[in-house]
Image: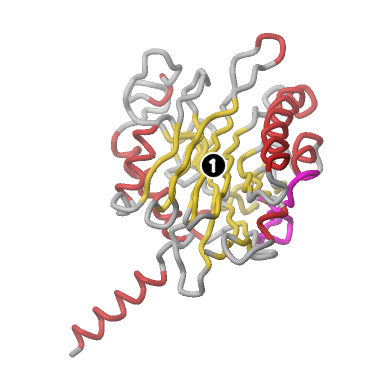
Amino acid sequence: MRTIYFLLISLLTITANTSCAQDGYGKIAFYNVENLFDTLDTPDKDDAEFLPEGKNNWNSAKYYEKLDHVSKVFNELGQPVIMGFCEIENRAVVKDIIVRAGINDRYAIVHTESLDQRGIDNAMIYDSTILNLKSSGIIRFDMPNGDRPSRDILWAKFDLNGTPLFVMVNHWPSRSGGQVESEPKRLIAAQSASKFIDSLLQDNSKCKIVFMGDLNDTPENIAPKMISGKLSPMIVESSGAFSGTHNYRGEWDILDHIMVSNGMFKGSRLKVKKKSGKIHSPDFLLTEYKGNTVPFRTYGGGNYLGGYSDHLPVSIAIKL
């Protein structure tokens, strides 16, 4: 009898942790996983620091630990219907994520190799038992002054019982060299994303769009405002315990965003739950550094810490 009881409890736990919750809501999430590289040398990419003989002494043990960490986050979030990733090296590592998470029988991948010299790409996974992928592609843009290419913006068009949904995954150029000095690069990314959004809304003003990613800018900066002028921001200071997704020198800021079109608030299906934007910060994603609570990252100051990421994951709830 006790054995049957525990089996029932286990089944209920698994059911509650699936992407399609019993209340009819699921999640769409985004996570910057911080340098998820495999251990293999890619000849046309500068991935030397993440090889066994590289400066980070990256090896299979560290790689599989990292995969388990990302899988744990995915399951902690309740197995989102769609989850976007940035800072992944290639399609193979995304495949390894879903295998380690035990969802490779249901989840499929959207990914395209970008021109980023380090091999950093964007990707997304989705529950193929709920959503049907209709098409996908990239938005590629040139950097000013002949600077090296940035990550492409990845997009996909899904269908849920006749209702289309467009999802965009972004990882805009970094703040390397300073926020002001690097801002023109992010403005180019914002302009490219904005044009794509405009084209969708011009075709259908009620179009359902979810825009997400690490924009390397806060909501107050110019580039994100170019998007929030068209879409509604779902990740705000009140979305999390620390008012941000990333900590730099003791200060929390929102760098990881999710925004949605007005069409996501309307209709009876694929409808976003108002004020459902959340910055997730379970204890295992955090640590203490110089008296401050910060994300528990994989590397710090060149030292292997064995953590998760320097960013916290974000999500929204949608009615399925």
Does residue 140 appear anywhere in the picture? yes
Residue appearing at x 72%, y 51% in the figure: 233
On whether residue 87 falls in the magenta region, the answer is no
Residue appearing at x 44%, y 53% in the figure: 131
Does residue 286 appear anywhere in the picture? no
Where 7 sits versus 148, above or below? below
Highlighted magenta segment, given as a residue range: 228-244
Q: Residues within 10 Å of mark 1 (few under 14, many from 20)?
A: many
Of 291 and 226, which appears nearest the observer? Answer: 226
> Which residue is labeled 1 in the image?
32
Tell me which colouring the rendered structure shows: secondary structure
Q: Residue 298 placed where, x, y %?
A: 47, 40
On whether residue 240 falls in the magenta region, the answer is yes
Examine the image and state in which quarter residue 32 appears.
top right
Examine the image and state in which quarter residue 304 appears.
top left
Q: Residue 51 placed where, x, y %?
A: 36, 24
Q: Residue 152 placed where, x, y %?
A: 57, 27
